[in-house]
Amino acid sequence: MLAELLRTNFLPESWVPPYQIRILRGVVRQRYHLVKTMIMNKNRIRHLLFWHGIDLRVFDVSSPKACCEIERLCFCETTKKSIRQCLDVILSLKRSISEIDRQLLEMMRGIESVELLQTIPGIGSVRSATIYAKIGDINRFRSSKALAIGQL
């Protein structure tokens, strides 16, 4: 039955990405996971501040300005410790994310599709690497519509 479906083109072929793209996908996924964890810790800090009735008017609660403001606030020792722990985790995650960003730049060097993607406003090195990791070789699609619906 499967052979008959394949012979009549009713069974779509599955594309297995090359090894390099599979590795790239893993790096992109790891970066996403770290960013998500960092956001979770920033939200935890905001929650702790909110719980104490403090509305810190900063965009990034882990910025040096925010850290100085947080240090000046009076909290119980457990809250101070929780915020400090979250800030330590965020700092560590920022270093890891920067390391992954450098790795992505190195992996994407010289790939024409990635360089072309970066000419689109708002698409930088990380987004272009993510798009390339998901799509792979764009030439395997017949048209832009085929790409949009995921059909070869």
Image (cartoon, helix red, strand yellow):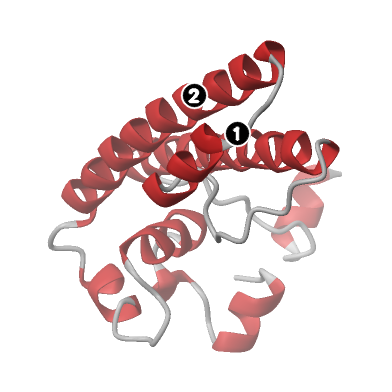
The residue shown at (60%, 36%) is 73
Element on which disc 1 rests: helix
Q: Is the residue under label 2 in contact with that under label 1 (CB below 8 Å)?
A: yes
Judging depth in this view, the residue of 25 and 118 nearest the camera is: 118
The residue shown at (37%, 43%) is 24
What residue is pinned by disc 2?
A: 89
What residue is pinned by disc 1?
A: 37
Judging depth in this view, the residue of 98 and 16 nearest the camera is: 98
Say left or right for 22 vs 111: right
Dividing the picture into quarters, in which one does residue 33 lie? top right
Amino acid bearing label 1:
Thr
Query: What is the x, y in percent for residue 8?
Result: 76, 65
Judging depth in this view, the residue of 56 and 116 nearest the camera is: 56
Seen in the picture, residue 26 relative to 114 is either above or below; the reply is above
Dividing the picture into quarters, in which one does residue 9 lie? bottom right
Q: CA distance from mark 1 to mark 2?
A: 9 Å
Seen in the picture, residue 6 relative to 97 is either above or below; the reply is below
